[in-house]
Structure formats: structure tokens, C-alpha cells
Amino acid sequence: MARLLEVKGLRTQFFTQDGVVNAVNGISYTLDEGETLGIVGESGCGKSVGVMSLIRLIPSPPGKIVAGEVLFDGQDLLKMSDGEIRSVRGNKIGMIFQDPMTSLNPVLTIGRQITEALQLHLGMNNAQARARAVELLELVGIPSAADRLDDYPHQFSGGMRQRVMIAMGLSCNPRLLIADEPTTALDVTIQAQIVDLVKKLRDELGMAVIWITHDLGVVAGLADRMAVMYAGMIVEEAEVKELYGNPRHPYTLGLLGSLPRLDQVSGQKLESIEGLPPDLIALPKGCPFYARCKYRIDKCKTENPSLQNVGVGHRIACWIDVTKDPVTTENPWQTA
Amino acid sequence: MLRFIIRRILGFIPVLLGVVIFTFFMARAIPGGPFDFIGDKSLPPSVVKNLEAKYHLDWPEWEQFISYLIGDELYIGPVKIFDLDPETPAYSYGVLRGDLGPSFRYRGQTVNDIIGRTFPLSAQLGVMAIILGLVIGVPAGIISALKQNTWLDYSATFVAVLGVSIPSLVMAPLLIWIFSVNLGWFPAATWGAKPPYFQNMFLTPGFDWGNYFSHAVMPVFALGTGLSATFARLMRASLLQVIREDYIRTARAKGLHESMVIYRHALKNSLIPVVTVIGPMFAALITGTLVIEQIFGLNGMGKHFVQSITNRDYAVVLGTILIYTIILVFSNLLVDLAYGWLDPRIRLDA
């Protein structure tokens, strides 16, 4: 498959009054046409900022992309003029956001909000754009779509609004769809519907997807490949089955260990990762996960490991081999 | 929508009645009366008694109130419903029949005459000042929000704070001193005192608009700049909040040009606070502004609000307050209708 996206050493910082926040610290990954990449990590680990940086949607100031390349179809999005990047946004790269309650403009009809991208990028006239908008709403499963075009967002339920968002994201047949925690604000049954919908549309339309979530369960059935982020860095990347079956980074192990399981003995406590992620203004010199890591050794405190191959398409940023090396401390947070 | 408007207008009836009752009895509860003094001299008791009899102030208060509300006599065709004062012809037809009664101090003039003469000038001044305020204030607020923390924003904010802080009491004499006394560009006063008058101007062929505006420009400017500062600060704060909303990010993610993002997605959402203050502001301004009218020598309605109270000119007190209240409730109705247009989540038909 052809290479669609190549991110190299992307680094985004926020210049705030308290200091420079290192939100994204040199992440690199690739994405092929039609491939789905899941990016997971806890809140504030740079997942969203990382993908917003791709299409330069970082609020600036205070945010700034300070280094890196984002090659989309061989063109560096970061070097494009404002006009050129606008012709990519919403056209070749569609986006869905986290909260459908606040991501739609409350004072414009959904028809207006869908058609404006069509008119802008595909040069459709009003009638063509409306016809296409009806098609899109039908595609995402909104009943009696033609009648609902002139409704306002508040007349839709949360799940329906997220479908509208997806219709907007897909409107110009993008080659890449970026979904930034699109199911977080929805309840579980609606989550499943939205995941199935995106899966179906991806297969029908053949687009690539970057799906951001903090819920490992949601992406498992959707993604081809997964990247785990921590403190603005990718700490592990692998095929989905490999990542869930053979996790190699202590942080990934911790994340998977903290998921409730059906086969768990009842009454047993869920595992948790003690402590908090590091302060992004003053990142530690060594591995950012050091303070919370059960496997840590002295080297981890002073040197930050880079991503290394440990299998086919499986990369981790760790000095330790969790399959061989022993646990060095049971409760690292207490002794840190 | 129509049902909403009708319901609201019906709702005005108890409000206005309440205002009339309250003002009527409160005004009469103030110690003193309209004929205590003429100038510096007090009048002999016998004269006061005659005057009070003439204006029916010797009646019991409830009779005075009935007379004020529906007149001192009521005939439907030839059928007499009541007549409080059968010997004399009708003294007043009552507020309900559009008669605000005679003034006690301006002999021979009714309150209708006074308001009819002074309100058009005040209204023109107020409307032009609000338009000027909006024309300067809203774009200034938008620019300083979009260029937040740049020199453009700082200077706009500085001017806005200045505009809010300098009272018209200072601004107006300053304008007169610069533009009338020193430069001689505009007349300092006499708006409406000489032809071209300010009434029926749209109906007068060949109306001298240049002369009209040369009189109007300074009062309008003195009043409007303060308003524009208020509008600019509201608009800036509101727009700054709106452009941080998620749906603005969505609009940008669609690839819309920044000007389109602001114009189509941010502006309408950010107008609500501005519209909210325009309602009461409109009512307060078009019924006259005492300070501006005094300084520029305008025969507006503003001075009657104050003078009528010190004069105990009950009918004028009631008349001015009633006009103010009517305009206030209607402008608030317009504000509510504007909300419905700005934000579809505000349903007006409920």
C-alpha cells in the first residue's frame, strides 16, 4: 500500500506564562492509504495536540509547532502557505472532534454546516451541496435526512450529532479522517454504533483513519496499528494483535492491566498505575515514565530511550525487556 | 411567534398599570405641592386653594386617580356611566383615552403637548447616538478581540476605557470649546430652536440636512462615543469567549478562511450581550438625557424627568415615566425577538 502520511520528529510547544509546555516531543509515525492507526494514552499526553498539529489547528499563540515534518502525499503540510493548508483541511483531511455537543455551531442549521465545506472545496452550488448533504446524512444513518437538513444541532441527540460531525468530516471524500476521541462523550451503546459506522465507512470509502482515544477497548476492533503515547512521546507502537497479545513497554502493560476483564475473579481490585504523569513544563531528563515504572533501573533516570524495533513493526522506547527483566520495585511511586 | 408577541403585549398591561398606580400615589406622597412657590415667592393660601380646586387636587385621591386613569366623566354615546364633576365640562379624558392631563406648572399646556414637543428631538438624538455607538463600538470590539494582545487591541482598549470613564459632562463642554469656540465649525446650541426644525424633516421637500447635521453632530458625538466604548468592551469580551469554542475549531478544520470563520460562525453567537444592553439603553436614551440636553441647550424630554419632580408637577412626572416605561417594555420585547433570531435554541413560541 502506498504511503499516505509520514510524520517525522513532530514537536509542539505552548508558550504560557508559567513556562514552555512540551506537549508533543518529537513523535514519528507513518500511515498507509486505507490504514487505521489508533493512538492511545491518558489525558494530557499530547494525543490531541499531536494530530491537531498535523493540520496546524493549534491555537497560536500560545501554541507553536517548533520542529518536524508532516509529509502528506509527499508534501510537507507544515511548510504550506495558509491558503494551501486550508485547501487540505476539510478536503483531503477530515476531522471529527470529541464533544458533539459543543463542536457544532448552535446557531447554524446542520445543512448549512455540512454544505459550506462542499461549496468551498468542491465548488458545488447550493442545490448540489444540499443534495450531497442529504446523501451524507443518509450515509451516516440519520433517518429522514432530507427533512432534517434545516434543523439546528440542539434538535439532535448526542449520538445523532456525532453522526452529523462524521458526515461533515467525510463530506469531501477525505483520504484521511482524524477522529479525536469521537466516542468519549457518548454512552456505551452509542459508542459501539459510532465505531461500527466509522469502520463501515472506512471500508466503503477506502480512507485512512487516525483514531485517538484513551479507551483501549474502543480501538481494539477498529485499528490496524496502535501507538501508545506518554508525556508527548510515542512509547510503543505495534500491530493491534501484537500490542494486546505481547505488550512490551511497562506503561502499556500498566494500561492493559488496568482494564476490567470478564474473566476476572470478582472482588479482586483493578490494577492501577500509581502516581501522575510528569510536569510537561519541566520534563525529567531520563525516561518520563521512570517515577511510575515497576521495572526501572538506574539508567532510566538519566537517559531517555528512543524507539527501537523489538519485532516486526513493533517498536518500544524502553531500556528494559519486560519478558526477561525482573520487577525492581512493587510500588515505585512511594519510593520515588 | 405571533402568539408570543401577543402574550407579551398583554403582559404589559399589568406592568403599566402597576407603574401608573405606584407613580401616582408616590408622587403625591412627596411633601409639598405644585403651587407652594412660583419662583421664589410663596403664594397666598387663598390662591393656592383656587388653583388646587382648578386642577381637582382638592378631590379625594381615589377620585383623582379615577379621573387620571379614565377621565372625570364617561359617556358612552348619550348614556352617562359616571361624572365626577357634573357642573363643569370634561377636565381630563384619562390616560386610557390617551390624555395625560394638563401640566400644573406650564400653564395652558397639556402633558401631551410637552411630550409631543420635546420627545422627537430627544428620540432623534438618542437614536443617532446609539447608531454611532454601534458603528464605532462593534467593529472596534471585533478588531481588538481578533488582534488580542497586540498594539491594536491595547490602543482600542485604552480608548474604550477612556470613553467609558470620561462622563458626557466633561466631553460635551470639551467638544463645544474645541469645535464651536475655537474652530467655529458647528453651532454650540440652537438645535431645533431655529429653522430647519427637527420635526417632519422627512416630509419636508428640500430639507436643509447639512444645517440639521451641523447642529446634531456634537450632541450625538458626545453621547455616542461613551456608548461606543461600552459596546466595544462588550463585543471584545464576548467574541474572545466565542472564538475559543469548539465549533470555531470545527469551522477551521473545514478549511474555511479565517474571515469566514469569524463572520459566519462567531459573530452571531457573540452579539447576544450587545443586544441585551441595547434594550434598556435605547429606552433610557431616546426619552432624553438631561446632561447633554442642558449643555447643548436642547429642548428635549430629559429635563422634564427631573424638573417635574422638583416642581411636584404630578401629571408631567406620570407622563414622562409612563412614556419611558412603554418604550422600555417594547424595546425589551424587541430584544427578546432578536434573541430568537440570533439563537435558535431560544424558542419564542412556548
Image (tube, rainbow, N blue to C red):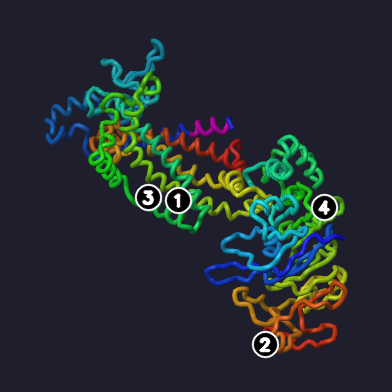
Which residue matches tag 1?
B233
B7 in magenta: yes
**Image quarter in which the N terminus of chain B is found:** top right
Q: Amino acid at mark 4?
A: Leu
User: Which dot, 1 or 2, sits closer to the camera?
Assistant: 1
Q: Position of residue A148 (x, y in %)?
A: 73, 39
Q: Are marks 4 and 3 in contact (CB under 8 Å)?
A: no
A31 vs B161, left or right, is right
Magenta extent: B3-11
| Dot 3: element | helix
Residue A30 appears in the figure: yes
Predominant SS of the magenta segment: helix
Judging from the image, mark 2 belongs to the subunit labelled A
Chain ID of residue with mark 3? B
Characterize the local packing of mark 1: few (<14), some (14-19) or many (20 or more) Cα atoms within 10 angstroms. Answer: many
Residue shown at 78% from the left, 44% from the top: A136
Q: Residue at x 64, y 65 (%)?
A: A65
**Dot 4: few (<14), some (14–19), or many (≥20) neighbours within 10 Å?**
some
Both labels 4 and 3 in a single chain: no
Residues at marks 1 and 3 on the same chain: yes
Q: On the picture, is B129 further left or further right than A149? A: left
**What residue is shown with label 3?**
B164
Q: Amino acid at mark 3?
A: Val
